[in-house]
């Protein structure tokens, strides 16, 4: 009779050990998958989540201005190398990469400020969950299209390989145009 409780204890310990082994095996499988998963996709997903939360809390008006400002900044940055005072300055800088990043950031901030100032209160100031998610997706699409096609941003970090076929040069116009149309549609439409 004394062996019966001992057997139950040993079976319980064995079951716990088996479940710990299964948990460690599952955890190792997840770690192996994440080790092969491109880190860029995790960063893009996190940025999408943060932008959606920002749009939900502050409204989609600022996110619309960010998307339009990024598109304008990309257009301006692609032409700045031929602009009169900058044509020699960027090429002769001590660090062309750093000067390109600084110029791109300044253009993005100025473009955002101009768009935000021009919009006034015409943009929708409220954000629903669905509208925020789609507006954040449109801004991410603009950012990825610019990253794929602006050489200065591509030298910062290589464009993620899984996205290369989708952001080919022949689709650049459609990514920017479609994202801007989506932002415009989301401005006046409130989804549940």
Image (cartoon, helix red, strand yellow):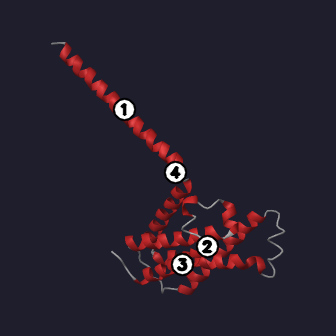
Give above or below for 32 relative to 21.
below
Q: Residues within 10 Å of mark 1 (few under 14, many from 20)?
A: few
Side (left or right) of 164 relative to 29: right
Residue closer to the observer: 124 or 20: 20
* Disc marking residue 37: 4
**C-alpha distance separating marks 3 and 1:** 51 Å
- The residue where tag 2 is placed is 169
Residue 188, given in percent of the width and then of the height, sits at 42, 84
Tell me, yes or no, if residue 57 can be seen here: yes
Residue that label 3 marks: 174
Dot 4 falls on a residue whose secondary structure is loop
User: Residue at image x 59%, y 75%?
Assistant: 170
Q: Is residue 6 left or right of residue 158?
A: left
- What residue is at 58 percent from the left and 64 percent from the top? 164
Q: Nearer the viewer, mark 3 or mark 1?
A: 3
- In the rendered image, the vertical position of residue 137 relative to residue 188, given as above or below: above
Q: Earlier in the sequence, mark 3 or mark 1?
A: 1
Can you tell which mark lies on residue 178? none
User: From the image, which quarter does the N terminus lie in?
Assistant: top left
Judged by depth in the image, the label closer to the viewer, 4 or 2, is: 2
Residues at circles 3 and 1 in contact by the CB criterion of under 8 Å: no
């Amino acid at each position: 009779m004394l062996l019966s409780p001992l057997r139950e204890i040993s079976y319980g310990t064995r079951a716990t050990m088996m479940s710990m082994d299964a948990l460690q095996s599952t955890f190792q499988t997840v770690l192996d998958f994440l080790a092969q998963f491109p880190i860029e996709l995790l960063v893009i997903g996190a940025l999408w989540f943060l932008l959606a939360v920002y749009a939900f809390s502050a409204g989609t008006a600022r996110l619309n201005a960010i998307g339009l400002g990024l598109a304008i900044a990309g257009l301006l940055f692609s032409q700045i190398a031929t602009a009169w005072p900058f044509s020699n300055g960027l090429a002769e800088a001590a660090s062309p990469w750093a000067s390109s990043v600084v110029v791109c950031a300044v253009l993005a901030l100025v473009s955002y400020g101009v768009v935000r100032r021009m919009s006034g209160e015409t943009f929708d100031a409220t954000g629903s969950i669905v509208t925020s998610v789609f507006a954040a997706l449109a801004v991410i699409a603009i950012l990825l299209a610019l990253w794929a096609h602006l050489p200065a941003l591509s030298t910062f970090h290589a464009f993620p390989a899984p996205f290369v076929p989708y952001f080919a040069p022949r689709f650049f116009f459609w990514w920017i145009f479609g994202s801007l149309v989506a932002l415009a549609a989301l401005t006046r439409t409130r989804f549940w």
